[in-house]
Amino acid sequence: MSNILFTTYSGTLTGNVGFGTNITLDCSNGFVTAVKHAFASGVQITTGTGSPEGVVTAPIGSLFLRADGPSSYVKQLGTGNTGWSVSGGSVAISTQAGTTYTLLPSDNNSLIRFTSATAVTVTIPSTLAVGFSCACVQYALGQVTFVAGAGATVNAFLGQLRTAGQYGEVSVVCTAASTYLLSGALSA
């Protein structure tokens, strides 16, 4: 692929660079907009904009380098285009303003701020992968209560499943299939 001049080319160029390794370049008007480096093992290094969650399909162990921000992502869980987690010491932070929320695979390695002024119920589904981990913070007056979804078991010290108060942080970890441990600022 050397000596290619991109003047006004738009489209996809793919080439083998040896050792079973392929490189794909997505181009628009002569500019490379995304690069995908696929190794013989199937693992990929991909560039692009925004989060890869729900967008980029890759095997576990793949890396996504974000061109429009400081984050990189590692494919840690699942198949298809889900299971991406922020890597490199960064944590994804999301804000939930509603009164109900169900944890998602994309919440892995993230901090979720709950900003409702009234009570919030967080459902923990049975489908999150072993090793899933996130932190949940009661960021406003609405106390956060954690409930087990169908088929899930949620364990906590003394059975305490609610945040202790504003700015109380609770860690949710999937310790075995469909089994979760809550720890942190909890109350009855």
Image: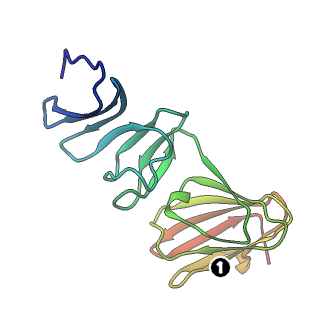
* Picture quadrant of residue 29: top left
> Which quadrant, please, contains the N terminus?
top left
Query: Residue at (52%, 67%) from the top-left corner?
Result: 174
| Coordinates of residue 111 in the picture (x, y in percent) | 65, 54
In the image, 169 versus 57, the foreground residue is 57
Query: Residue at (43%, 46%) from the top-left corner?
Result: 74
Q: Of all residues shown, which one is farthest toward the bottom?
A: 150
Vertical placement of 135 versus 56: above or below?
below
Mark 1 closeness class: few <14, some 14–19, many ≥20 residues within 10 Å: some
Q: Residue 6 vs residue 125: left or right?
A: left
Query: Residue at (53%, 38%) from the top-left corner?
Result: 71
Q: For the residue labelled by badge 1, is the local secondary structure a helix, a strand or a loop?
A: strand
> Which quadrant, please, contains the C terminus?
bottom right
Label 1 is placed on what type of residue?
Answer: Val
| Coordinates of residue 167 in the picture (x, y in percent) | 81, 57
Q: Residue 127 vs residue 135: left or right?
A: left
* Picture quadrant of residue 39: top left
| Coordinates of residue 137 in the picture (x, y in percent) | 73, 59
Q: Residue 161 vs residue 172: left or right?
A: right
Vertical placement of 37 versus 60: above or below?
above
In the image, 153 versus 101, the foreground residue is 101
Residue under circle 1? 147
| Coordinates of residue 46 in the picture (x, y in percent) | 35, 39
